[in-house]
Amino acid sequence: MSAALTIPMEHGLLLAAILFSIGLLGVMVRRNIIFILMSLEIMLNACAMVFIIAGAHWGQPDGQIMFMLILSVAAAEVAVGLGLLLQVFRRFDSLDIDKANRMRG
Amino acid sequence: MIQLGLFYIAATITIASSLLAITRHNASHALIYLIVSLLGSAIVFYVLGAPFAAVLEVLIYAGAIMVLFVFVIMMLNLGAAGIKNEQLWLKPGMWIVPSLLCLALLAEILYLLNSSSQALSGAVIGPKAVGIELFGPYVLAVEIASMLLLAGLVGAYHLGRRYLLDMRGESI
């Protein structure tokens, strides 16, 4: 693994930052709830990647443990999010997030 | 040297498939691209010396969580009408302002990252070290994660029930 010494930390962080920006862009642009949830997954994955990179930087297993905690957060978030999605679809007959604005936000 | 090549190829694939995933009109196509993106990040994790995290990424993210999306897309069964709706909702002009905002934020991060330069240690941290740490000092975090998953389970069960429709006076 001595060849891995040449991967600079910035490039890993750059990858995570680009992925996070892509996810943020998706959340901002899309109106379909399925796509918003997918973009949230991309963002969570980018956050987990930062933890892995930090763990690799200091050579500690803590980064992977935080990755697992983020994984469980993502699993719970997707389960509840998809349940909400089904309710929105049943009530409004549409996946458009803008239809669910009874509070006129 | 091979590790370096793997990292950059996997990173490129991850970014490209993520971009494709958020721009598709068809939900199933977007989901496939998202799975490719997650597999690419699994390779990145492996190259960075975290094989256990790479395995978890494939098993849980690309496997279990994406299967939930597949089930929901199959349940809704939107088909051609869904694609037509997406084309209606997603006009090309809508991308401009959010893209500029995200690019501005990315440029700020780039500027901050520019200041220092350090190489990663490249040491492999195996599952054994992770397991010892996880059930040693982090055992409380495991408990909290289990409670979070239980809350997610209860919430998903409640939201998935059909009786919520009764509040609107619809038949079940």
Image (cartoon, rainbow, N blue to C red):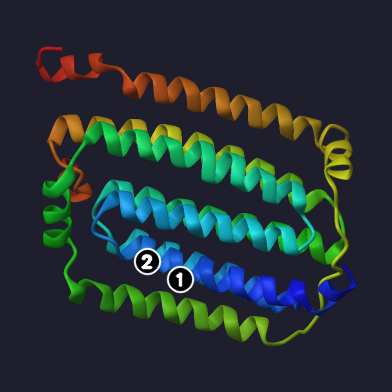
Q: Same chain for marks 2 and 1?
A: yes
> What's the amino acid at mark 2?
Leu
What chain is tagged by disc 1?
B
Residue under the point 76% across and 51% down: B51
Q: Where does the image place residue B114, in percent across and percent down from the top left?
A: 67, 87
Q: Is residue A102 left or right of residue B122?
A: left
Residue under the point 67% across and 30% down: B144
How many discs appear? 2
Q: Residues within 10 Å of mark 2 (few under 14, many from 20)?
A: some
Residue under the point 56% across and 22% down: B150
Residue under the point 68% across and 46% down: B55
Reading the image, the residue beneath label 1 is: B16
What chain is tagged by disc 2?
B
Mark 1 secondary-structure assignment = helix
**Image quarter of the C terminus of chain B:** top left
What's the CA distance linking mark 2 and mark 1? Answer: 6 Å
Q: Residues within 10 Å of mark 1 (few under 14, many from 20)?
A: some
Reading the image, the residue beneath label 2 is: B20
Q: Where does the image place residue A35, in percent across and percent down from the top left?
A: 32, 52
Q: Where does the image place residue A5, in percent across and percent down from the top left?
A: 85, 75
User: Is label 2 in contact with label 1 (beta carbons under 8 Å)?
Assistant: yes
User: Which quadrant of the figure has residue B38?
Assistant: bottom right
Q: In this picture, is B127 found above or below B6?
A: above
> What's the amino acid at mark 1?
Ala
Q: In this picture, is A7 found above or below B172?
A: below
Disc number for residue A94: none
Mark 2 secondary-structure assignment = helix
